[in-house]
Amino acid sequence: MNKKKVFYSFFVVLLALQILFPATLLADVVGKFNEVRGDVSMLRATVTTTPKVEGPVETKDVVATGDKARAKLLLTDDTLLSVGQKSNLEVTEYLLDKNRRSSIISLKAGAMHTKVEKFLDPDSKFEVHTPTAVAGARGTEWLTVVSENPGTTFYALQNSIAVFNPALPTQVVTVVAGQFTTVMAGLAPTIPAAFIPAAIGGIMGEVGAAMPTGAVGAGAAGASAGTAAGAGIGAGTIAIGAAVVAAGVAVAASSSGSSGTTPTHSTSSHSHPY
């Protein structure tokens, strides 16, 4: 048998294996499980398994946690994702090329603490998508809590994050350390406002994350009105937002203890403002 026939036979066998076992051949491993506690499951392709510590994480994996359960995912760029009980997340997109990355994590229910290592490339992005919002950063730390209302509350713990409702992509707010914003269905993010660290202590405990030392509170009291005006948020939205801000902590607290169904949402492309 000549070399061409050997190569052709090998190619045919490889193609057949890819068709028969698409989930295992040429897998896109993007990280590993750092912690698995309680009822945690992982859906990969059409197979549901129980992940193990040090087990691989791949693009499109869906991780779900049950009551009083949690999991931590360490990605290859040292990003750490810590999810609490009754949460559901998908590693929707993950591309890493030297100093550039493009990552989308979809949190469909529950709570997640995100600690992202900084990338200097201006084309890099790291986004958390929820049923009502998108939060993005190049490198920072924040807490995301999804409620059943539906709504999402973001708490910035270090540096800052840019937040918007994909239905209103031009109305972006910048949330700095010590501030939070809430994004309800059909509405722009509320004006960033200061939060008390004790208000999220319970949720941070559920996800197994520690509050950054001295990070919360720096600059927390400023720039709310200026941020809203700069993002093009109108007076009507501000009036609605003021009422929602008051309920932001309550939204977060109620969602962390609820199971609910998982809503779906699109992850269409857009330019990132961070």
Image: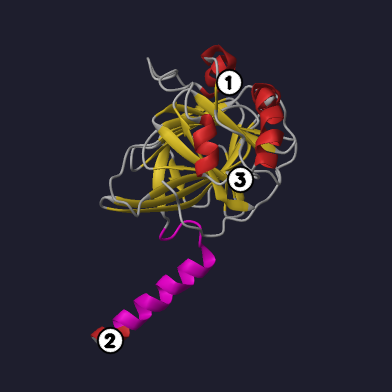
**Mark 3, residue position:** 48
| Residue displayed at 44% across by 19% down | 216
Q: Nearer the viewer, mark 3 or mark 1?
A: 1
Give percent across and percent down for residue 28: 41, 55
Numbered circle sitting on residue 225: none
CA gap, disc 3 to disc 2? 40 Å
Say whether marks 3 and 2 touch (CB < 8 Å): no
Picture coordinates of residue 132 (x, y %)? 65, 44
- The magenta span reads 6-26
The answer to whether residue 110 is visible is no
Q: What SS does tag 1 mark?
A: helix
Answer with mark 3 or mark 1, whichever residue precedes in sequence: 3
Quadrant location of the N terminus in the rendered image: bottom left
Camera-near label (2 vs 1) is 1
Residue matched to label 2: 4
Give the amino acid type for the residue marked by disc 2 in the picture. Answer: Lys
Q: Main secondary structure of the magenta part?
A: helix
* Residue type marked 3: Thr
**Going from the N terminus, do you reach mark 3 or mark 2 first?**
2
> For mark 1, what is the residue?
203
Query: How many tags in the picture?
Result: 3
**Residue 101 counted in the magenta span:** no
Mark 3 surroundings within 10 Å by alpha-carbon count, few (fewer than 14), some (14 through 19), many (20 or more)? few
Asked whether 8 or 270 is in front, the reply is 270
